[in-house]
């Protein structure tokens, strides 16, 4: 049982949770995640540790409500508990002094990108951050990213803020303007990571991506999280979640992520009905 | 059926001669009919009614040198407890069992008795052996149903503490025995529920989770601190544990699923047995949407493999509503590693056996969902290293089966997480098991013991418990003497 200390809305359907988890707060490194279960009937869902405060004994999760569990989480109040939090899981992101490092975060991917930008900065890199969101209201952590980056470029799909366009455009512009960076780290929706990787492959820039296949145990026991990297089967929860973007089979990942769509919709509808029946304020339908 | 004891009948039974005893047929355990059980996850056998258990117990000849005990990896006093059942003293019987086995409701259900205790029973030479497993299960159920489960006495505190990694049968047994000796014990478990394979692997219809929980509750009441959601190798290493514990026991099991590296193995709808069973058992996907975790809705399922795990998967798929379930195994039925009883149950439930067949690739549709499995027929050639005849593909015999779900159940290896993060822990490079002296359960690392599947590869519940038992004696010896270099503990 882990106590929720804060639950704050950061942007439309994106909440920031501060959770009591002293040991995880001490041990976690950038790039690692936890697996959370809300209640007895709940699913196990992986969430990146966006930040941690070892002194306070807390970790921060930034979560987008996309379905049953993540929407149900938004209803939890400070003082409530998460039934299970296990972590830190996954291998930490490999950080070294590359020189100039570009961190690309798309949508909710900005949350996991933040600790990586911090770590790259701390290792002495020049950090350029590209943030992408569908529109201004969905952009998160801009301030925090500015604090850890030498330069921040914001793009929105609808042009409501920053430059209008995709992060790949911003990255192409950046390469044209400043030359090749030494390293790129991309995290966000799978198509975004795919196109960033295609672009950097053309330019021969080493690129890591953080993959988010469906997981259960997170310890290498079930193989549900398997991904194909360089033609080989890897388990994202223990071998990753970071992999060489030039080697990942993104199309396979996208298909595997979508496998339970129908059942997920049923679970979500069922929760809405229960909320209605019990007179609980409903989380936004997505 | 009345479940009352009939003292008169017991008296008559007790008066029987050995010869007469041998005339009593092995008693039948009533079970759900195949048709009924295909549609539910409830346990298949109902257990023995009290008087049936008494009759069965009266078949035992109370051998002076009981061969059955030799066959039990934990050495339960079988004639002792069976004789107590024979007299109708169920409380005495369960006490006797629990002198050596604290998880009898589990073992009575899942032990491969036919190759262990019952294989050795003298009655088996001419007829059917005493149903030792069913009797063990019977007294354990009787105790639980009568609310009589009590933790055994705990030893005087020794001031020593032991960290146990993994809460499967090996870890639980080591913890129980160490508490009896007065050591304090903390179990660290990666998942959110303790029990290991008992919880996530073996299906509800063979081993109800409420029974596992009840037996684990007693372990808790013995003062064992069970920390779930605690992955050693991630949040802490074995070295960290050795800083606050005087010894560490590794019982992390064989949880790494093997795949065959076939084309299409990552299609949607292709699972490892571990994932399929974990979704269904631990996460209770069979109760979806009451429970949130989904599992593929399947009409036609192919299960690859011929062991107990494959049987469990096939029988699970039937209960999840699949209309046709194929079991694809590359050898013939004679070579199947699964228990005869499981094969029998699977056949009764309508599973279609494709023997001497093996998959060569999986074919998917646009969305990436598996649609077909392409198989090739096999024939048996020369015996291989294991003595079994090696299956060889018959060229040109490929054909396809339409399926929407595939479960790969070809076995598991040890999970490398702990070995990878522990300095000085020697591992068998081929099998991935932790090198362990099977007399003392000591590893290459001072103060670190191991047992169960992590030490020998995928085996059985009772073997893991036997290791746990030996390890507890060895750990106790080490904690009392501080001596590490010994070859035997007597
Ligand atoms: C390593 C990792 C780190 C992640 N970090 C974050 C994060 O920091 N913030 C965040 O908002 N999201 C994160 N995610 C994604 C998050 O786990 C999913 O959004 C969440 O599981 C959705 O659950 P749901 O019940 O709300 O939605 P559902 O309706 O059940 O699912 C919506 C979609 O989420 C994905 N999903 C569903 N179940 C799982 C599962 N068990 N494991 C992984 N993905 C699943 C599927 O693609 C699915 O189509 C991460 C995923 C991974 C693998
Ligand atoms: C589907 C299936 C059916 C089976 N049926 C039978 C049967 O009928 N009869 C029989 O005798 N045997 C059966 N077996 C085999 C039997 O279950 C195992 O041999 C036995 O459970 C091994 O016990 P163990 O204690 O070594 O490990 P496990 O039961 O595997 O338990 C290991 C535990 O350690 C935990 N763990 C692993 N790594 C870590 C870590 N790094 N940190 C913390 N915790 C960790 C795991 O989560 C797990 O809970 C079956 C196995 C399977 C998979
Ligand atoms: S524990 Fe297993 S082997 Fe031992 S007596 Fe019981 S059923 Fe037989
Ligand atoms: S060998 Fe058979 S008959 Fe003899 S004591 Fe054991 S169970 Fe009884
Ligand atoms: S989530 Fe089960 S192996 Fe990765």
Image (spheres, coloured by chain):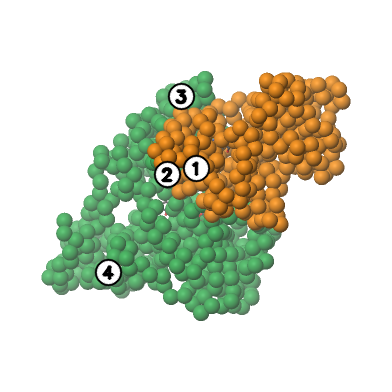
Q: Is residue A161 above or below residue A275?
A: above
Location of mark 4 (residue): B90
Q: Residues within 10 Å of mark 1 (few under 14, many from 20)?
A: many
Q: Nearer the viewer, residue B228 or B448?
A: B228
- Letter of the chain shown green in the rendering: B
Chain for disc number 4 = B
Query: How far is the residue under mark 1 from the one under mark 4?
Result: 41 Å
- Give the residue at mark 2: B284
Q: Is mark 1 within 8 Å of ligand 1?
A: yes
> Along the horizontal axis of the image, is B23 left or right of A188?
left
- Tell which subunit mark 3 falls on: B
For the residues carrying marks 2 and 3, which lies nearer the camera in this image? 2
**Residue at 42% of width from left, 44% of height from top?**
B284
Q: Residue at x 35, y 47 (%)?
A: B205
Q: Look at the numbered disc 3 and give the secondary structure of its residue.
A: strand
Q: Which chain is orange?
A: A
Residue B371 tag number: 3
Same-chain check, marks 1 and 4: no
Q: CA distance from mark 4 to mark 2?
A: 34 Å
Query: For this view, does A98 lie left or right of residue B351?
Result: right
For disc 1, the marked residue is A43
Q: Tell us which disc is closer to us: 1 or 4.
A: 1
Q: Secondary structure at mark 2?
A: loop
Q: Which quadrant holds residue B355?
A: top left
């Amino acid at each position: 049982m882990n106590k929720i200390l804060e639950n704050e809305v950061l942007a439309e359907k994106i909440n920031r949770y501060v959770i009591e988890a002293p040991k995880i707060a001490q041990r976690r490194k950038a790039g690692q995640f936890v697996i959370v279960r809300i209640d007895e009937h709940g699913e196990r869902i992986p969430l990146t540790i966006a930040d941690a405060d070892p002194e306070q004994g807390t970790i921060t999760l930034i979560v987008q409500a996309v379905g049953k569990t993540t929407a149900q989480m938004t209803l939890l109040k400070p003082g409530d508990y998460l039934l299970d939090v296990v972590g830190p899981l996954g291998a930490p992101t490999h950080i070294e002094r590359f020189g100039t490092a570009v961190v690309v975060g798309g949508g909710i991917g900005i949350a996991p990108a933040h600790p990586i930008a911090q770590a790259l900065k701390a290792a002495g890199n020049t950090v350029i951050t590209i943030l992408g969101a569908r529109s201004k209201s969905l952009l998160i952590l801009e301030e925090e990213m500015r604090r850890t980056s030498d330069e921040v470029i914001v793009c929105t799909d609808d042009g409501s803020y920053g430059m209008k366009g995709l992060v790949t455009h911003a990255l192409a512009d950046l390469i044209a303007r400043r030359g090749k960076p030494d390293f790129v780290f991309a995290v966000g929706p799978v198509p975004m990571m795919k196109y960033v990787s295609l672009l950097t492959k053309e330019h021969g820039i080493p690129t890591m991506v953080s993959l988010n296949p469906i997981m259960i145990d997170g310890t290498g026991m079930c193989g549900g999280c398997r991904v194909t990297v360089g033609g080989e089967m890897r388990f994202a929860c223990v071998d990753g979640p970071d992999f060489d973007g030039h080697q990942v089979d993104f199309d396979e990942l996208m298909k595997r992520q979508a496998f339970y769509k129908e059942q997920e919709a049923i679970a979500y509808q069922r929760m809405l009905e229960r909320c209605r029946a019990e007179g609980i304020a409903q989380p936004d339908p997505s | 059926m009345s479940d009352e004891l009939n003292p008169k009948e017991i008296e008559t039974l007790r008066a029987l001669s050995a010869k007469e005893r041998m005339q009593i047929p092995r008693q039948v355990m009533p079970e759900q009919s195949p048709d009924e059980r295909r549609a539910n996850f409830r346990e298949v056998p109902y257990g023995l009614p009290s008087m049936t258990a008494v009759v069965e117990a009266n078949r035992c000849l109370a051998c002076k040198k009981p061969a059955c005990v030799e066959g039990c990896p934990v050495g339960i006093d079988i004639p002792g407890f069976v004789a107590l059942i024979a007299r109708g003293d169920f409380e005495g019987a369960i006490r006797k069992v629990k002198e050596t086995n604290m998880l009898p409701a589990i073992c009575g259900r899942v032990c491969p008795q036919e190759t262990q205790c019952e294989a050795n029973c003298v009655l088996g030479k001419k007829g059917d052996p005493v149903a030792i497993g069913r009797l063990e299960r019977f007294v354990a159920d009787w105790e639980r149903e009568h609310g009589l489960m009590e933790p055994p006495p705990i030893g005087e505190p020794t001031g020593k503490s032991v960290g146990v990694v993994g809460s499967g049968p090996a870890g639980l047994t080591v913890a129980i025995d160490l508490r009896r000796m007065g050591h304090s014990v903390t179990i660290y478990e990666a998942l959110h529920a303790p029990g290991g394979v008992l919880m996530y692997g073996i299906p509800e219809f063979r081993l109800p989770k409420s029974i596992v929980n009840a037996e684990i509750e007693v372990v808790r009441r013995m003062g064992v601190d069970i920390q779930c959601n605690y992955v050693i190798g991630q949040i802490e290493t074995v070295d960290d544990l050795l800083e606050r514990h005087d010894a560490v026991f590794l019982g992390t099991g064989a949880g790494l699923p093997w795949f065959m590296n076939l084309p299409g193995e990552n299609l949607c709808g292709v699972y490892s047995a571990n994932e399929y069973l974990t979704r269904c058992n631990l996460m209770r996907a069979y109760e979806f949407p009451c429970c949130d975790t989904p599992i593929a809705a399947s009409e036609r399922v192919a299960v690859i493999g011929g062991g107990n795990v494959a049987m469990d998967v096939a029988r699970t798929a039937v209960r999840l509503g699949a209309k046709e379930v194929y079991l694809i195994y590359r050898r013939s039925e004679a070579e199947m590693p699964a228990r005869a009883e499981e094969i029998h149950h699977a056949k009764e439930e309508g599973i279609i056996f494709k023997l001497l067949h093996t998959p060569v690739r999986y074919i998917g549709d646009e969305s990436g969902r598996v649609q077909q499995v392409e198989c090739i027929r096999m024939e048996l050639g020369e015996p291989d290293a294991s003595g079994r005849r090696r299956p060889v593909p018959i060229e040109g015999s490929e054909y396809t089966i339409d399926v929407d779900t595939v479960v790969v159940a070809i076995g598991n290896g040890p999970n490398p997480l702990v070995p990878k993060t522990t300095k000085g822990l020697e591992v068998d490079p081929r099998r991935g098991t932790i090198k362990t002296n099977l007399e003392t359960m000591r590893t290459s690392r001072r103060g670190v013991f191991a047992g169960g599947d992590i030490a020998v590869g995928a085996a059985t519940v009772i073997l893991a418990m036997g290791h746990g038992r030996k390890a507890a004696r060895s750990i106790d010896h080490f904690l009392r003497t501080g001596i590490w270099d010994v070859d035997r503990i007597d």
